Image (cartoon, helix red, strand yellow):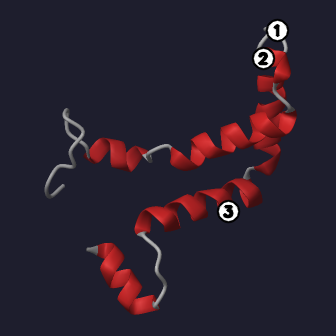
Amino acid sequence: MFDRIYREFTGKNITFAGIVYDSRKQVLERSFSSDLNALTHRLRDIAAGTRSGRDFTFSQLHRAIEENYRRFSSLSDLRKRNFHGNFRDGS
């Protein structure tokens, strides 16, 4: 429903999930770029300790961390879900 209202209001054909995804990318790029780089360096050090992990480049690890962040449900979404993964009504 929100997607339809947003499309009608803005004229843009994008879903709410798409807006969240793009917004998280912007937050990472603008506010947490140094943290993301530090985390990637740490992951690269850990990966270098395994034979298969040595094959990953810094860029690949960076993109993987970034993608996981963007796709991870927000805590508010997780709190709204019930045991079966469905959203609760109301609160």
Q: Is residue 45 visible?
A: no
Badge 3 amino acid = Gln
Q: Percent position (x, y) of residue 25?
A: 65, 58
Badge 1 amino acid = Gly
Residue 58: image tag: none
Quarter of the image with the C terminus is bottom left
Q: Is residue 82 above or below residue 31?
A: above
Badge 2 amino acid = Gly
Give the alpha-carbon distance from disc 1 to disc 3, as whole Å.
32 Å
Badge 1 marks a residue whose secondary structure is: loop
Q: Percent position (x, y) of residue 38?
A: 82, 35
Task: Give neighbour class at mark 2: few <14, some 14-19, many 20+ (Cα, 10 Å).
Answer: some
Residue 26: image tag: 3
Badges 1 and 3: C-beta atoms under 8 Å apart?
no
Which numbered disc, 1 or 3, marks the residue that appears first in the sequence? 3
Q: Nearer the viewer, residue 62 or 29?
A: 62
Side (left or right) of 61 relative to 25:
right
Badge 3 marks a residue whose secondary structure is: helix
Q: Residue furthest left?
A: 89
Give the alpha-carbon distance from disc 2 to disc 3, as whole Å.
28 Å
Side (left or right) of 78 relative to 59:
left
Which residue, given by chain and number where applicable, does mark 1 sit on?
49
Q: Quadrant of residue 86?
A: top left
Which residue, given by chain and number where applicable, does mark 2 sit on?
53
Q: Percent position (x, y) of residue 47?
A: 78, 17
Q: Quadrant of residue 52?
A: top right
